Image (tube, rainbow, N blue to C red):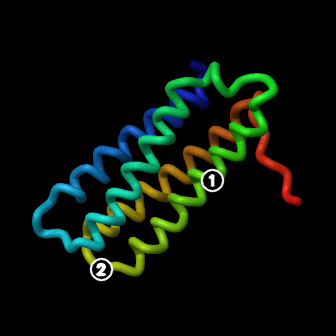
Amino acid sequence: MTDPWIALHASLLAAQSVFQRVMTAPRNSPLDRRISEMGFMSADIGVLFAETPGLFAGAASENTATLAEAIAGVFAALKQAARRTSGSDMEDIAAVCDMCETAISEFLAGNSKVTPAQSP
């Protein structure tokens, strides 16, 4: 794996641990847990993506950028939802969602084989 893949992978794994902590905390509301579950699943997709960079090389690189941008969009939406919900755990969720968005942006910027999708 190249550095952009490693950094993306590490950020998503770190985020998963925060999502897991919030999902399993008995004090959290069902909404908090649901937001965390969606974040965990999104990070899981990203981890699988980052663990198999060879599948996304060459002609598939445009699809790679599209997938990465879609995952970043999910994290952006979850970050907004977390910010609208009170509690320190939701602040943590918003922070890790932001971290994941940043990691994906840096991945796209730092990986010469992957270019962001063109707007129509």
What distance separates the C-alpha of mark 2 from that of mark 1?
Answer: 26 Å
x and y percentages locating residue 81 in the rendered image:
43, 74
| Quarter occupied by the N terminus | top right
**Residue at image x 61%, y 21%?**
2
The residue singled out by tag 2 in the image is 86
Q: Nearer the viewer, residue 72 or 56?
A: 56
Disc 2 crowd, CA 10 A, few/some/many (<14, 14-19, 20+): few
Residue displayed at 41% across by 64% down? 94
Horizontal relation, residue 102 to residue 78: left or right: right
For residue 32, above or below residue 20: below
Looking at the image, residue 21 lies above or below residue 55? below
Would you place residue 37 above or below residue 34 in this image?
A: above
| Camera-side residue of 66 and 13 | 66
Q: Which mark is residue 26?
A: none
Mark earlier in primary sequence (2, 1): 1
Query: SS of the residue at dot 2?
Result: loop
Spot occupied by residue 46 in the image (x, y as percentages of width and height): 50, 40
Say which element carries label 1: helix
Question: According to the image, label 1 marks what residue?
Answer: 70
Three-letter code for the amino acid on which mark 1 is drawn: Ala
In the figure, residue 96 lies in which quadrant? bottom left
Q: Is residue 81 left or right of residue 66?
A: left
Q: How far across and how far down the image is residue 66, in percent? A: 71, 46
Q: Where residue 26 sits in the image (x, y, percent)?
A: 11, 64
